[in-house]
Image (cartoon, rainbow, N blue to C red):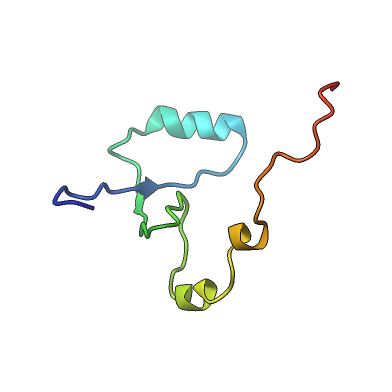
Amino acid sequence: MSDKKKAQVFHFDLYGKREVKYDFLNQNSVKSINWNELDVKEPHYFFVPKNFDIIEIYEKYFSVSELFIEIGSGVKTERD
C-alpha cells in the first residue's frame, strides 16, 4: 500500500436461532460488541479468523489457479 493507513477489519461470530440473534442485535450496538480484529495478509484477505503460523508451509504447494489453467463456468445447458 501507499502511505495511506491500512484499514482495520473486525469479525464477530454469533451462533443460534434467528430469535437469539435478533435479541442480541436489539440489545447491542456496533460499539458494544466485542469484535476480534483480523490479521489481514495479502493476497488472501480472509474475512474470518485464520491462523497464519504455518503460512510458509501452505505457500510451498501449488495454487488452484496453477492446477486449472483454463477458467470457465463449466457445462451450461441454458435450459434450466
Q: Tell which of 14 and 27 is nearer to you.
A: 14
- Name the residue located 28 percent from the left edge and 49 percent from the top edge: 8
The image position of residue 59, as x and y in percent, is 50, 72
Q: Tell which of 50 and 55 is nearer to you.
A: 55
User: 15 left or right of 6?
Assistant: right
Residue furthest to the top in view is 79
Q: Tell which of 26 and 12 is nearer to you.
A: 12
User: 26 left or right of 62?
Assistant: left
Eyeballing the image, is 35 above or below 28? below
Q: Quadrant of the C terminus?
A: top right
Residue furthest to the front in view is 70
The image position of residue 57, as x and y in percent, is 52, 78
- Name the residue located 86 percent from the left edge and 21 percent from the top edge: 79
Residue furthest to the left in view is 3
- Name the residue located 49 percent from the left edge and 47 percent from the top edge: 13
The image position of residue 27, as x and y in percent, is 39, 31
User: 67 left or right of 10?
Assistant: right
The number of numbered badges drawn on the structure is 0
The image position of residue 36, as x and y in percent, is 36, 53
Quarter occupied by residue 41: bottom left
Eyeballing the image, is 68 above or below 30? below
